[in-house]
Amino acid sequence: MTTRLLLVSDTHIPGRARRLPADLLRAADAADLVIHAGDWVAASVLDELEQHGEVLGVFGNNDGPDLRGRLPEVAEREIDGVRFAVVHETGDARRREARMDKAYPGADVLVFGHSHIPWDSVSPRGLRLLNPGSPTDRRRQPHHTMMTAVVDSGALRDVELVEL
């Protein structure tokens, strides 16, 4: 079974944008699962994404009690034999891979956010770390971003950073 993923984080609505980008919503419609790594800011963003499909998400440091009441700090799910973990913050980039190996020993893929800086690396034990950046607040990055990926036959493939 093939599962198409949309990876998103740090939407910061309404602080950084009034609404989600149209390209992101089209990608959500095409995905089988949307993974959001926190800092939604408004619960209406979660509600809107849920209208486009299934959402696996966590709360971030800028999310209030409404989102914290609906979402966990860490989410875990196996998708077609690939074990995913989702968290908002992983700390400093230095030695991130080694720290996350220890923090998420049961995961094959860790999706995270917070920095707004896209990230794609592999830890010493083979954990894939993915940060999709932000579709609404690029900070020091050249573009707003999100990621797409496919899980198929127990493997993560076709990971793509998408500029918005």
Image (spheres, grey):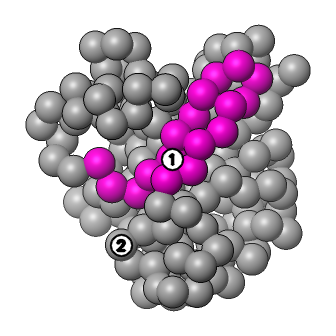
Q: Which residues are magenta?
A: 74-90
On residue 10, the disc is: none
Asked which secondary structure carries label 1, the reply is strand
Is residue 18 shown above or below 98?
below
Image position of 65 (left or right of 105): right
Amino acid type at circle 2 is Asn
Q: Residue at x 73, y 62 (%)?
A: 25
Q: What amino acid is found at the position of numbered circle 1 in the picture?
A: Val
Identify the main secondary structure in magenta. Answer: strand
Q: Name the side, left or right, on which 49 lies relative to 13.
A: right
Quarter holding the N terminus is: top right
Residue drawn at point x = 74 percent, y = 67 percent: 49
In the image, residue 53 above or below residue 106:
below
Note whether 46 is above or below 7 in the view shown: below
Point out residue 66 in the picture as x, y percentages from the top left corner.
58, 86
Name the one closer to the observer, 93 or 27: 93
Residue 75 belongs to the span the image colors magenta: yes
Residue on which the image places disc 1: 86
